[in-house]
Structures are given as C-alpha cells and as structure tokens.
Image: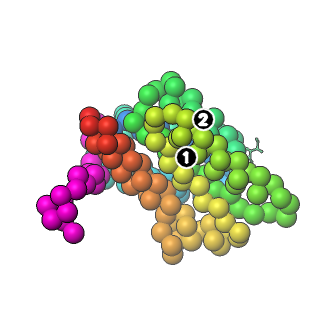
Amino acid sequence: MSEQESGARVIDPPLDGEGLRVGIAAARFNEFFVGHLLEACQRELRRHGVAEGDQTIAWVPGSFELPVAARELIDAEKPDVVICLGCIIRGETTHYDHVAQESARGIAQVALTGKTPVIYGIVTAETVEQAINRCGGKFGNRGGDAALAALAMARSLEQIRGV
Ligand code: INI
C-alpha cells in the first residue's frame, strides 16, 4: 500500500551517505576475514557518498572488545552511526560461545543505552568454510550489508527525530 493510500507517515529514507560521519570498530582476530568485511563495508559506504575523511576505523584485538570501542568512538567522535565488524569461528572449546554472546550483548547494550545506532557486523561461523561464504564468498559479504544497515539506521533515526 502506498503512503497516500494508507495515510500513514512512512519513514523509509533513501540510503544517502553524503555528510554522514561513520565510526568503524574492527576486530583483529581472524583478521583475514575481517579485512574482507571492512573492504566491502567501505566500498558500500563510498558508493553511497560517505567521504573517506568522515570515517574513523578503530582496530581492537577481538570481537569481545568491539562494544567498548563502539562506546568510546561515540563519546570521542560523536559519529552518526558506528559499525562493528568481527569474525568468530567455533573452535574446540566454549570460548566461541562466550565471545559471540558477549559481543552481541555488549553491542546491543551500547546501542540501547545511547542515542547512536550501532550496527552488528559480526560473522559467527561454525567452520572456516561458513566464514568464507559470508565474507565475500557465495553468500555475499556481511561487511557490505552492515554498511547498508548503518546508512538506513542513521537516516531513519534522523527522520524519526524530525531532523
Ligand atoms: N575473537 C574473535 O573476534 N573471533 C574469535 O573467533 C575469537 N575466538 O574464537 O577466540 C576471538 N577471541 C578473542 C576475544 O574476542 C578477545 O579479544 C580476547 O578474549 C581478549 O579479551
């Protein structure tokens, strides 16, 4: 149903990145994969008009550290949106579960306790093959998806707030 037919106020802005300031927190662990996520993320941001000079990239040791980096980027740089990129691959112990659970919980907490959208761009994979498929392989690239989600959230929140 179109906006006119329903009479509803519809918030669905175009993904225009011009003038947006973007923080990116990237986990060094599994850097080979995260590098591919970052590449696709920046490519998508660029394609939608986000200037290179409006991006700050903060590398941290692993996905567990992403929420803290996101919070600090928000405090220091006041970006319009922060994107967290990481890759967690299951090993032989329960380490995977702790890192996966806490990074997701932490990112949600930073997003919900602040006013800046924080995008979850972490690939969680049971195997290296699953990771390859989501970091530029046959199921696409979650880094590019994260960039699109960032643009959508930044622009939607602007409109919801009536900016
Ligand atoms: N960090 C990741 O980003 N991916 C992983 O797969 C991973 N595994 O499996 O251990 C991982 N661990 C490191 C963790 O994120 C922290 O950097 C570390 O525990 C220090 O706090």
Residue 121 in the image: state x and y as whole percent. 54, 53
- Which quadrant would residue 26 be assigned to in this image? top right
Question: Mark 2 to mark 1: distance in Å?
Answer: 9 Å
Residue in the picture at 76% in, 57% down: 97
Q: Is residue 43 above or below residue 135?
A: above
Residue 124 in the image: state x and y as whole percent. 65, 61
Q: Are marks 2 and 1 in contact (CB under 8 Å)?
A: yes
> Three-letter amino acid code at disc 2?
Ala
What is the secondary structure assignment of the residue under circle 1?
A: strand
Residue in the picture at 64% in, 56% down: 87
State left or right for residue 106 relative to residue 5.
right
From the image, tell me which residue sits under label 2: 69
Q: Which mark, by number, is residue 84?
A: 1
Query: Is residue 41 inside the magenta stretch?
Result: no
Image quadrant for the N terminus? bottom left
Residue in the picture at 65% in, 73% down: 129
Mark 2: give few (<14), some (14-19) or many (20+) Cα within 10 Å.
many
Q: Which residues are magenta?
A: 1-19
Q: Which mark, by number, is residue 74?
A: none
